[in-house]
Image: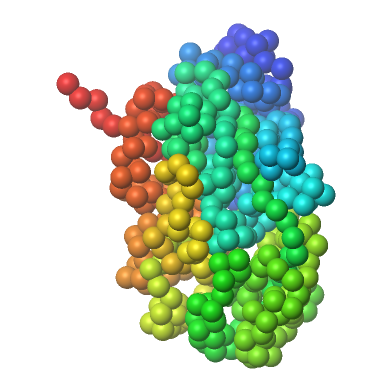
Amino acid sequence: MLVNDDIHALSKAVSGPVVLPDSPEFAEETFAFNVATVHRPDVVLGAADAQDVATAVKWAAEHRLPVSVQSTGHGANSAIDGGLLINTRRLQDLQIDPVERTARVGAGVKWRTVLEASVPHGLVGLHGSSTDVGVVGYTVGGGLPVLGRAHGFAADHVRSMDIVTADGALRRIDADAEAELFALMCGGKGNFGIVTALEFSLFPLGDFYGGGIIYPGADADLIFAAFRKWLPTLPDDASPSISLLRLPDMDFVPPPLRAKFVVHLRFAYMGNREDGDALLAPMRTVSTPLMDTAGPMDYLDVDQIHMDPADPLPFTDGGALLKDLGEETVAQLLELAGEGSDCPLLLVEIRPLGGALAQGGALADAVSGRDAAFLLFLVGFNIPPMAAASIASIREILAAMAPHSTGYTLVNFHGEPGDEADRARAWSPAVYERMRSAKTTYDPGNLLRFGHAITGLPATG
């Protein structure tokens, strides 16, 4: 049990604020973008720098307190109960090297900040559907980019990272320095240390064509059939996705779409208007769109492609990797989530994989999904009275899709982690065993046990 002297010792040793549950700052320091997840740690450190993180981890180990970490809380699928929470949102260092085409960011930097600094140099990083997400948490979970079919997962292009391991040591690791630890941190979701800084590659930005087409939900069967035929005709430079949306009557939804069931086709392409229009033309003749925003786009407007909510919401989610999107798969999905169903979910999304996502980077990292054809991602509101229905619908759809699934997930799209067998599904068996071995080496006391955490190998002898 912590006493005042323990807290005082931590406060004296660090530069950032140390916050207790009865402090006015506690709610702000523990707040997650997923507001359905309410963290209740014993103590919070608002880390001011990497040394604060190292000092706090050593302090926690001495007091036998488990340690968790959060920056934006976008990936907060499960609540933190007890222990020390290290909030890294103050780590805002950002350096762009336009010659080497790299970015180095602190653990609190969001993708929006990176783009605002890199786009003037004609460079972009491999962010996901929302640039409000933190770079580090997204990337150590693999990072599925908007332009993933062209360039691969974000984790494939990490150059180096600074991490604090469970012994409190601050390490800079890369493909040469502690290569196995580095490989497993790229996609291993922070199981072996807390990232304080990350360096990664940027990519040249030329003409960019993006946006979406929104169709009436009643035509979902026609639209999905056209999507299945259209997808094989696209080059890897084109990254589409498609979703069923049951849009609430809320401010973040454009007024013409509020309280409607629609199909949303998203499209991102590194190319000019003529080529983009030609690629998208077959889908523009399907149904009668309610909205069509696709065209040449300022890259800083890239969030308009997916139109993810910008404000925190209470949600629950889940996902699966699919082997196919055949007629039977689509028919089952639409039976459970299409027009006329009682599906309560806000989002039922299909993201095509393949292309560079299937190839991997120069180093064998921990990212899963390279053998999958599609990602299925499901999101529902996690507030009464909708919470129970959302959770039940996610389970029902995932069960129905199981025959079409690889059996695995992407860790950032896994949803709330369950037991050990469920958590293991975020990686291939071979990678999972490597991760368990590394956990035994770098965190034998299981200090980092929150979130999508794994356990080490059992003791022998």
**Residue placed farthest to the front in the image?**
99
Q: Say which of 98 and 342 sits in front.
A: 98
Whole-percent x and y of residue 188?
A: 46, 41
Q: Is residue 58 above or below residue 179?
A: above
The x, y position of residue 133, in whole percent, is 66, 48
Looking at the image, residue 315 sits to the left or right of residue 113; the answer is left
Place of residue 177 in the rendered image (x, y in percent of width and height, measured from the top left): 48, 26
Q: Decide which of 135, 220 is in the foreground and name it.
A: 135
**Can residue 19 be seen in this snapshot?**
no
From this view, report whether residue 334 is shown above or below residue 308.
below
- Indicate whether 202 appears above or below 15: below
Q: Residue at x 68, y 39 (%)?
A: 100
Q: Nearer the viewer, residue 345 or 299?
A: 299
Q: Quadrant of residue 31?
A: top right
Residue 130, percent across and down?
67, 56
Is residue 453 visible to us here? yes
Residue 237 position (above or below residue 76) = below
Where the C terminus falls, by quadrant?
A: top left
Number of marks present in the image shown: 0
**What residue is shown at x 58% (from left), y 61% (from top)?**
150
